[in-house]
């Protein structure tokens, strides 16, 4: 998996977060290798995520990414911003459109081809508890080929004190 | 035929799932999560966690096998092949970390059938073997009605 953002980028000053703040965007290229690795790590061996014939038999354009992998990348957008994977209090998403991950272009094998996902996020609201702890609701957008693949994706996170 | 009498039922608890460091590292690598808190025990401890922290979508690792076990139960009558994941929610009482021993309890929350498609809502309550609640998940799963 290759990413053009991540820990290299300058992190937004987390104490300056306000409603409307945008998270540093994340662009991830998913290849067949990434899908196989995720299958092994998650235990989801549904063949639509690694076998074109099975995927096509259920009217998909070919092998598609696991919805939960796309959702995990949405979580990464948030955890890389906060620097803490334990700061996510809740997270939800709808799987609205499959993400095809091809390994052939014009009849020629290209296992590095894959699909590029563009992830962005915006702080929708901030709440402050009685003890001063701040939480933020982040709306997440995940797009492939300019089209949304996660619907109503949102996380509630604990902000640093 | 799907047996609608399952709606509202709570299924037997899973055997304990032991959250291992290497599984967290492998899962984090597979989703591209490079936070040291998922890979480096000392970094996780320095940040106040008892051990490596699991990425937020990690519960899929041990809840999905319980869901699959139920969906493949011939008594329920679900057509497993072709099942589609519609949406997913997760809520944490606290982050999952290496060393946790977690029990999953699946509850059948809802079933609707529209235009030949079943829409099933399953809730998973996850707690430690000591009974401490850790997280809860909710999945919407879709499958074609078996007309045979």
Image: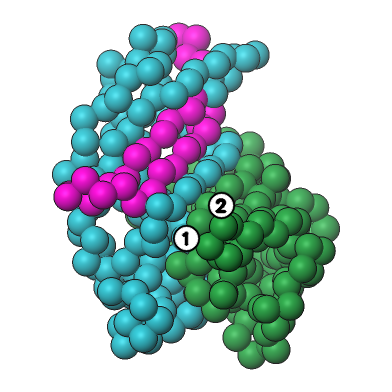
Chain colours: A green, B cyan
> For numbered disc 2, what is the local secondary structure?
strand
How far apart are labels 1 and 2 at the CA level?
8 Å
Query: Quick one: quadrant of the N terminus of chain A?
Result: bottom right
A126 up-or-down from B136: above or below: below
Residue at screen point 20% across, 56% down: B101
Assign the magenta stretch its main secondary structure.
strand
Q: The magenta stretch spans which residues?
A: B120-148
Is residue A69 something one can see in this rendering? Answer: no
Task: Please state the horizontal and vertical placement of residue A2, each as a whole percent of the image.
Answer: 61, 79
Asked if the residue under mark 2 is in contact with the one under mark 1, i.e. CB atoms within 8 Å, the reply is yes
Residues A69 and B24: in front is B24
Residue at screen point 53% across, 39% down: B85
Q: Which chain carries label 2?
A: A
Would residue B127 be found to the left or right of residue A33 on screen? left
Is residue B136 a member of the stretch shown in magenta?
yes
Is residue A54 something one can see in this rendering? Answer: yes
Is residue A58 a member of the stretch shown in magenta?
no
* Numbered badge on residue B56: 1
Task: Please state the horizontal and vertical placement of residue B5, each as a whole percent of the image.
Answer: 36, 9
* Numbered badge on residue A91: 2
Q: Quadrant of residue A37?
A: bottom left
> For numbered disc 1, what is the local secondary structure?
loop
């Amino acid at each position: 998996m290759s990413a053009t953002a991540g820990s290299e980028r300058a992190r937004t000053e987390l104490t300056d977060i306000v409603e409307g703040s945008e998270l540093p965007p994340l662009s991830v290229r998913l290849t067949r290798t990434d899908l196989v690795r995720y299958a092994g790590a998650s235990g989801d061996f549904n063949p639509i995520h690694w076998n074109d014939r099975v995927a096509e038999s259920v009217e998909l354009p070919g092998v598609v990414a696991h919805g939960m992998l796309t959702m995990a990348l949405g979580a990464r957008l948030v955890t890389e911003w906060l620097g803490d994977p334990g700061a996510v209090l809740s997270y939800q998403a709808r799987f609205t459109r499959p993400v095809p991950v091809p390994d052939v272009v014009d009849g020629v094998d290209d296992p590095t081809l894959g699909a590029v996902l563009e992830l962005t996020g915006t702080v929708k609201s901030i709440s402050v508890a009685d003890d001063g702890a701040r939480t933020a609701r982040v709306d997440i957008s995940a797009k492939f080929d300019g089209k949304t693949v996660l619907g109503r994706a949102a996380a509630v996170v604990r902000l640093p004190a | 035929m799907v047996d609608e009498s399952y709606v509202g039922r709570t299924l037997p608890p899973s055997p304990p799932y032991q959250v291992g460091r290497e599984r967290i590292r492998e899962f984090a690598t597979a989703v591209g999560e490079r936070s040291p808190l998922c890979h480096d025990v000392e970094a996780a401890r320095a940040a106040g966690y008892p051990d490596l922290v699991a990425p937020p979508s990690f519960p899929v690792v041990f809840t999905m096998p319980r869901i699959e076990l139920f969906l493949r139960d011939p008594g329920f009558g679900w057509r497993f092949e072709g099942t589609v994941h519609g949406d997913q929610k997760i809520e944490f009482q606290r982050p999952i970390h290496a060393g946790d021993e977690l029990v999953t309890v699946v509850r059948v929350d809802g079933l609707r059938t529209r235009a030949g498609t079943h829409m099933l809502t399953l809730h998973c309550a996850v707690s430690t073997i000591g009974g401490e609640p850790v997280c809860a998940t909710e999945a919407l799963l879709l499958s074609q009605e078996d007309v045979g």
